[in-house]
Amino acid sequence: MKFVDEYRDGDVAQLLARLIRQEAKPDRNYRLMEFCGGHTHAIFRFGIVDLMPDNVRFIHGPGCPVCVLPAGRIEAAIKLVEENDVILCTYADLMRVPAGKRDSLQKAKARGGDIRMVYSATDALAIAQANREKQVVFFAIGFETTTPPTAAVLKIANAMQLTNFSVFCNHVETPPAMMHILSAGEAKIDGILGPSHVSTIIGSQAYADCCDKYRVPLVIAGFEPLDVIQSVLMLVRQINAGEASVENQYTRAVSKGGNKKAQSLMAEVFEQRPLFEWRGLGVLPESAVQIRSEFADFDAEKRFGMQAIATADIKGCICPAVLRGMNNPDECKLFGTACTPEDPKGACMVSSEGACAAYYSYGRYR
Ligand code: SF4
């Protein structure tokens, strides 16, 4: 299959891995953070981790949109459904993420809440059009990849003067989170595998400040196995040369400036949110967006007076440390015992992009 098989050639993978083993200097470590959960899954699914020499290690980053949403925002959505006559539309992964007191959107649905799974923001809009007598709220989450579609439906809803539709905006931004992790310095990072999908929107240039300020090389990598292995080789070469620049391995999809149309759509509908709480990273300034006043009628937080509810993560769950690259999932005492994909105790085990789910799915036990 075009664009798939050609990036999964085993012989080429072995060749690239051999080059990495030859070029990685035995007297130093190469600690590479893959920011995006899609890469974490590719690394384990395709056995890439087994092709690496011992001194080339992957550190898992916070690039899973479901994982970084703090439980308090989910609690707020549950409260919204239980105290108002609304239909809440959300992506499937979010349904099972534990909120406070072992609650979840799935459990709220079982209690009678009208919570519906959707594949896109457009689906939520269609539900609003089909249910004019009810208020319909779209629980919007994700990085820059999913922000433009939310912006698009907000513009459509505005043009249609659809008074029963609103968005609970939880869209976050990649470069500020990356900057935070590098500035905190908790996880020693020698190089970064930059996200694929996000970079198609924001472009490779968006990471330049990160590389310059923290002297860390970054290679934007595609999701196929050869993309990842080649990107690792590119990082090893930059690290060996003492360089810290942005390189783009995923040239078939990512440009320097990104998708200008999507960027202007986002700028038209959203503005910087002064503060936003991330699971694991805490409250970060200017790391998320909120709906502009021109579209305030469609802002569920304003329409319903929503507020995040202070909620503790489940005892023993180390998701916050996993998201900061401090711990691997198999260092959690609950991993694979009390916490499994069937009965997740934390967001990182629920999401299809979560690091704990990747370890569990591909049998990475110590
Ligand atoms: Fe949390 Fe489960 Fe991951 Fe442990 S294994 S960090 S409990 S999601």
Image: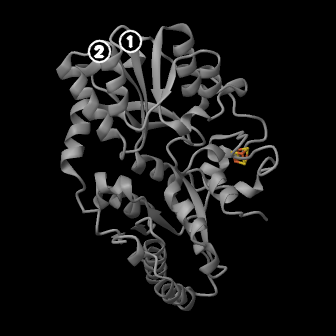
Disc 1 + disc 2, Cβ < 8 Å: yes
The answer to which of 185 and 95 lies nearer the viewer is 95
Q: Residue at x 55, y 55 (%)?
A: 61
Amino acid type, residue under disc 1 in the picture = Arg
Label 2, residues with CA under 10 Å away: few <14, some 14-19, many ≥20: many
Q: CA distance from mark 1 to mark 2?
A: 7 Å
Label 1 vs 2, first from the N-terminus = 2
Quarter of the image holding residue 310? top right
Relative image position of residue 71 (x, y in whole percent): 61, 30
Q: Residue at x 45, y 52 (%)?
A: 179
Q: Residue at x 52, y 14 (%)?
A: 80
Q: Residue at x 63, y 46 (%)?
A: 348
Query: Which quarter shows the N terminus?
Result: bottom left
Residue 201 vs 26, above or below: the answer is above
Relative image position of residue 95 (x, y in whole percent): 57, 32
Relative image position of residue 263 (x, y in whole percent): 24, 44
In the image, taking residue 262 as reference, residue 177 lies left or right, namely right
| Residue wearing tag 1 | 303
Label 1, residues with CA under 10 Å away: few <14, some 14-19, many ≥20: few
Quarter of the image holding residue 231? bottom left
Per the image, label 2 sits on a secondary structure element best described as helix
**In this orientation, does residue 252 appear?**
yes
Query: Which quarter shows the C terminus?
Result: bottom right
The answer to which of 25 and 62 lies nearer the viewer is 62
Amino acid type, residue under disc 2 in the picture = Asp
Mark 2 CB in 8 Å range of ligand 1? Answer: no
| Residue wearing tag 2 | 297
In the image, taking residue 225 as reference, residue 147 lies left or right, namely left
Per the image, label 1 sits on a secondary structure element best described as helix
**In this orientation, does residue 283 appear?**
no
Relative image position of residue 358 (x, y in whole percent): 62, 57
